[in-house]
Amino acid sequence: MFDLTGMTALVTGASGGIGSAVAQALAAQGARLAVSGSNLAKLEAFRDGLGGDHVALPCDLSDGAAVDALVPSAVAALGKLDILVNNAGVTRDNLVMRMKDEEWDMVIRVNLEAAFRLARAAARPMMKARFGRIVSITSVVGTTGNPGQANYAASKAGLVGMSKALAQELASRGITVNCVAPGFITSPMTDALPDAQKEALNARIPAGKMGEGADIGAAVVYLASREAGYVTGQTVHVNGGMAMI
Amino acid sequence: MSETADRVKKIVVEHLGVEADKVTEDASFIDDLGADSLDIVELVMAFEEEFGVEIPDDAAEKITTVKDAITFIDENKG
């Protein structure tokens, strides 16, 4: 089950916390990857650590022209593209009343617009192949909201709506479009929180602890697999029960 | 019938799964041949590949019949 041997995947934000776990999970199931990120040295180190025959494709996702070139580059490097994982995301947290235009624009551009551009480009080879898997990493806050994150929550909710529209457009061609919505996942950022704050966070989670990147990787592997071909337009919430939607 | 017309009709038959005699030059992809908007996108992609032409979105929107496609390709292929 969930064997991805012979499949290829483009993962954005692949050297980050969740992105690296997603890339590792896909590679462990046999997929050949194009990993993308903004920091070339970090990205190449991550690619080398994966072992196998993967490629590193640096890309600034706030640059529309660079984003439009990423899928063609991945197809050229991998020979085809079966799986697109829109994982990269940025935050520019601020209260709405203090939020700058640039903070709003940056988050929407990287988290939502880049995902749209990549999905638009990926749909072409996927339609021809009559097979494709597009998975976007959204967030529990896209559903619940979170003070200080109007831009981020909007971008993540936007991914869900976009995915549902695209899922309906492409379902007849064997392409599924889904989202994975993590709750609190451990990262260097959450590790640095004071214990009291960690305990307060964990108290909000029925599972009593934060999730791991591998929990997200497993959900992405499932949605990317051939076995999940009848699942489309859905959001899989991976959050230890902190929000039941 | 031109060579372009033959190749266009062949692509239309293959992609839409319609009978060849229905693919007349006046046939509308949507009204006569049962294509939906996604089929049109695919047809345009197939034409681009077969003839090595670029069909921009504003031109693609005006291609509604078999004849429209043949005319555009004849005028633009290298």
Image: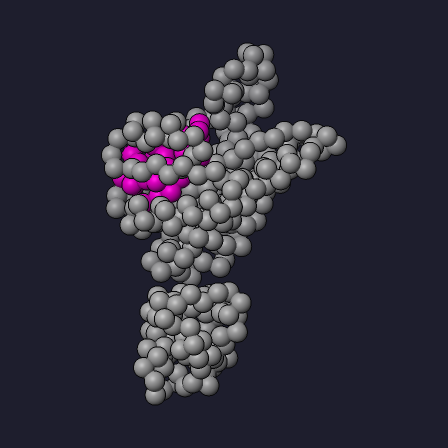
Q: Quadrant of the N terminus of chain A?
A: top left
Image quadrant assignment for residue B48: bottom left
Question: Which image quadrant: the C terminus of chain A?
Answer: top right
Q: Is residue A50 left or right of residue A71?
A: left
Left or right position of A28 against A240? left
- Total labels: the figure holds 0
Which residues lie in the magenta part? A8-35
| Residue B47 as seen in the image, left or right of residue B63 | left
Task: Establish if A209 lies above or below A216.
Answer: above
The answer to whether residue A145 is seen in the rendering is no
Please report the residue visible at 58 percent of the width from the left and 24 percent of the height from the top: A204
Residue A213 belongs to the span the image colors magenta: no
Residue A195 appears in view: yes
Please name whichever residue, B49 or A20, is drawn nearer the observer in this view of the structure. B49
Q: Is residue B33 above or below residue A54?
A: below
Q: Is residue B22 above or below residue A237?
A: below
Residue A202 rendering spot, x and y as whole percentages: 55, 20
Image location of residue A205, percent across then percent down: 55, 25
Compared to residue A165, the image places residue B26 above or below, namely below
Residue at the extreme right: A97
Residue located at (25% from left, 37% from top): A53
User: Which residue is found at the position 32% from the left and 82% from the top?
Assistant: B3
Residue extending farthest top: A195
Instruction: Tell me which colouring the rendered structure shows.
Output: one colour
Which residue is outermost to the front? Answer: B78
Location of residue A172 in the rendering, given as x and y in whole percent from the top left corner:
42, 61
Query: Residue B33: where, in percent of width, then height?
Result: 44, 79
Q: Is residue A32 magenta?
A: yes
Residue A37 location, quadrant: top left
